[in-house]
Amino acid sequence: MSVILAAVSAFLLRNLGMTVSFLLLLAAFVLTHIGLATPFARDRLVARLGEKGFLGVYSLVSLLLLGGAIFAYRQLDPYPVWAAPGWAWLFSSALMLGASILFVGSLTPANKGLAGVPVDERPASGVLRITRHPMMWAFAIWAIVHAWMSGSLPTVVLAFGIGALALIGAAHQDVKKRRLLGGNWVRYERQTSYWPLGAQFSGRQPWSALWPGAVPVLGGALLWGLATFVHPMLMRAPAVPPWGALA
């Protein structure tokens, strides 16, 4: 443990200025993303700016802070804390395929968490039968996979921030929707689960619901194939399966 602490201290000293900038920008991104979405802040900003104005400011602040954090991250020296085993590459690639399917499925009208999609008495469908927060869990799975496979301290910190924001944001969305929609959202919650596969394990959804439909599966496979192909061009990233095996 003392060796690890000494090595981390040396890394921080070599990268002190950019490390501080990275941590402050990442913290600001997480805190403002959550803080601006609270009823106290959101209601007051919407009253002044309107719904579209609020969404514009919210998106701009998030993009600027996240972009700044990523820029600072890219200036940091990679610092390996652990090395993932060889078998983990195929397993992680499979997890990212699942995350891609969840992400594509979250963009369909089946996702009642999306703005403008009515929350009525129609039963949950598609990836929403796996989790009612498919987009947030897609980001969380991305974060877990990239932290695990990278093992680099800056990447672990960046992934932790994005993953924590996704899961906290999902829980916050439930609270907000319950406040705004009351019984309609409560009925929807009873059909679905915050946790992936939670509805299957609890008996609220059959295991056959793991098939989300052709659109999420085909679209997710296309997104996964494209993302893994361009992976070496992004963020100093290595080639990953299946492309890594073909290199």
Image (tube, rainbow, N blue to C red):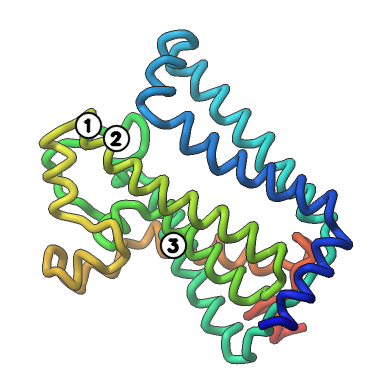
- Residue on which the image places disc 3: 101
**How many numbered marks does the figure carry?**
3
- Residue on which the image places disc 1: 179
Q: What residue is drawn where x is 82% and y is 50%?
A: 18
Q: Where is residue 44 shown, x and y percent of the image?
A: 41, 15
Going by the numbered disc 2, the residue's amino acid type is Lys
Label 2: state its secondary structure.
Answer: helix
Q: Where residue 36 is drawn, which disc sits there?
A: none
Q: What residue is drawn where x is 20% and y is 56%?
A: 192
Q: Nearer the viewer, residue 219 or 70?
A: 70
Q: CA distance from mark 2 to mark 1?
A: 5 Å
Q: Residue furthest top?
A: 48
Q: Where is residue 151 shown, x and y percent of the image?
A: 67, 75
- In this rendering, the answer to whether 16 lies above or below 177 is below
Is disc 3 in contact with disc 2, using a CB cutoff of under 8 Å?
Answer: no
Residue 82 visible from this viewpoint: yes
Label 3: state its secondary structure.
Answer: helix
Q: What residue is drawn where x is 60% and y is 83%?
A: 89
Q: Is residue 185 left or right of residue 235?
A: left
Q: CA distance from mark 3 to mark 2?
A: 26 Å
Going by the numbered disc 1, the residue's amino acid type is Arg
